[in-house]
Amino acid sequence: MVTNDALHAALEDRAATYGLLARLFNREVDEALLEGLRALPFPADTGRPDLDEGARLMGAYLAAAHDDARTELAVDFARLFLVRKRSTRVACYPNESVHTSDERITMGDARDEVRALYLREGLKAADAARLGDDHIALELEFMQALAARSLACAPGDEADGGTKWRETLAAQAAFLDGHLLNWVPAFADLMADSAQTDFYRGLAAMLAAFLRDDRAFVEELRN
């Protein structure tokens, strides 16, 4: 039986993971973040092949990072997510609309749908004007906010019979199914194929693996 303390720790970890992933896709790695990443453990023996491979690639890159690592990562980030010289059919655009619309356009129905969801939940994407509401970083930030809400109303803390707990878990399951897992695996494959550093190859693998694992975790919490 999972204790309340263990559940709280797991919920804190998943909210923090969503926050870190969102930051990594929002903009390039700066010096402070690079130093922080170097201090993180990247265990590659969890028994989950995709997650382990991503951790191995990222950890190995950071362990061997040289003085020009930040510049190298900035160049790779720009090539992957900022430079728009390739067709949207082969470029790893970080916006859901490109991957879920027949026309592969950047401001499609998915953008309007997630914007409406943010508003319904009383949240505003601070970087929406720069990135687009359906950018991977902002969708991950949205999940971070919902994960934090789960932590605030976890079993043992709720004062409403668990209604808020069930509602926030249902919202997270729906968003994972309808606005992350419906496009991120394909996006991550394109990202891994296009990346020039093992850091971003590993990040692609970890992103897709974490979202799949988290969807299963949310389902466990709901049952």
Image (cartoon, rainbow, N blue to C red):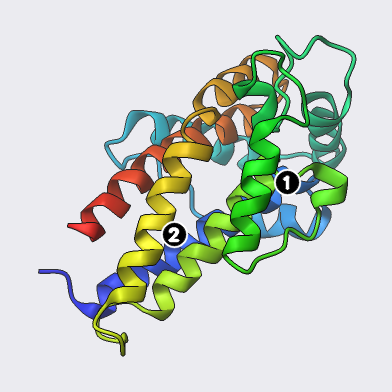
Q: Specify the amino acid type for callout 1.
A: Asp
**In the image, is 205 to the left or to the right of 135?**
left
Most distant residue in the left direction: 1
Mark 1 vs mark 2: which is more N-terminal? 2
Q: Residue at x 48, y 47 (%)?
A: 175
Looking at the picture, which amino acid does disc 2 mark?
Answer: Arg
**Residue at 16%, 69% in the rendered image:** 2
Residue 6 or residue 136, whichever sits in front? 136
From the viewer's perspective, is residue 32 above or below residue 176? below
The relative height of residue 30 versus residue 25 in the rendered view (above or below) is below
Q: Nearer the viewer, residue 13 or 91?
A: 91
Write down the residue under mark 1. 133
Instruction: Tell which of 121 and 4 is nearer to you.
Output: 121
Is there CB contact under 8 Å for labels 1 and 2?
no
Asked which quadrant contains residue 193, the reply is top right
Assign the N terminus to one quadrant of the image.
bottom left
Spatial separation of the CA atoms under disc 1 and disc 2: 22 Å
Instruction: Give how far across and how far down residue 12 sits, in percent.
Output: 44, 69
The quarter in which the C terminus is drawn is bottom left
Q: Residue 40 lies in what quarter of the image?
A: bottom right
Please state the horizontal and vertical placement of residue 209, each as a whole percent of the image. Answer: 42, 35
